[in-house]
Image: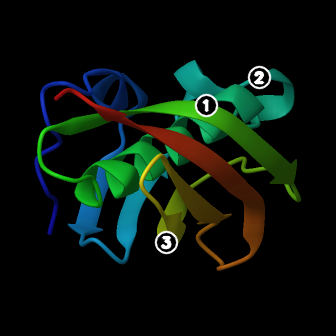
Amino acid sequence: MSIDIPLTMPFVHLLGIAITSATRDEIKGTMPWRTEICTTAAVIHGGALMAFADSLGALCAFMNLPAGATTATIESKTNFFRPVTKGAVHGTTTPLHVGRTTIVAQTDLRDDAGKRVALVTQTQAVINRA
């Protein structure tokens, strides 16, 4: 099953990201290995992995926003553990904190074998439009 990504996030289409489930408590998605998102030695570029995690984190924040609010990433911390040279990267994002002014989400990125590729913690601003 794949969920349509809002048209307000066109960059996820460029990366080939598919959102496979989305609730307030957990976002899941995949990003396939492709030459176009690789660096040397056919390894998925760290920036592509960070963009994948940021997209899942933003969707997690969006799902937890109060009515009429929007969000933007204000901080992101990534630890890389292993390269990805084939297959796909699978991401799971959960909210660690849902507050009035910020939402903190953590994204666990894993390869097809289930081994951790990266762990990303990000803070999203809650921007009230009222």
Categorize mark 3 by other alpha carbons within 10 Å: few (<14), some (14-19), many (20+): many
Tell which circle, 2 or 3, labels the residue nearer the N-terminal end: 2
Q: Is residue 97 above or below residue 130?
A: below
Name the one closer to the observer, 106 or 89: 106
- Type of amino acid at the residue the image marks with label 3: Thr
Quadrant assignment for the C terminus: top left
Q: Position of residue 110 (x, y in %)?
A: 64, 67
Quadrant assignment for the N terminus: bottom left
Q: Residue furthest front?
A: 130
Q: Position of residue 40 (x, y in %)?
A: 84, 23
In the picture, measured across the screen, residue 17 lies left or right of residue 105, that is: left
- Secondary element under disc 1, as helix, strand or loop, is strand
- Secondary element under disc 2, as helix, strand or loop, is loop
- For residue 21, the mark is none
Q: Position of residue 59 (x, y in %)?
A: 33, 49
Separation of disc 2 and disc 1 at Cα? 26 Å
- Secondary element under disc 3, as helix, strand or loop, is strand
- Type of amino acid at the residue the image marks with label 1: Ile
Separation of disc 3 and disc 1 at Cα? 17 Å
- For residue 74, the mark is 1
Tell which circle, 3 or 1, labels the residue nearer the N-terminal end: 1
Q: Residue at x 35, y 77 (%)?
A: 25
- Type of amino acid at the residue the image marks with label 2: Thr
Q: Is residue 121 above or below residue 12?
A: below
The residue under label 3 is 94
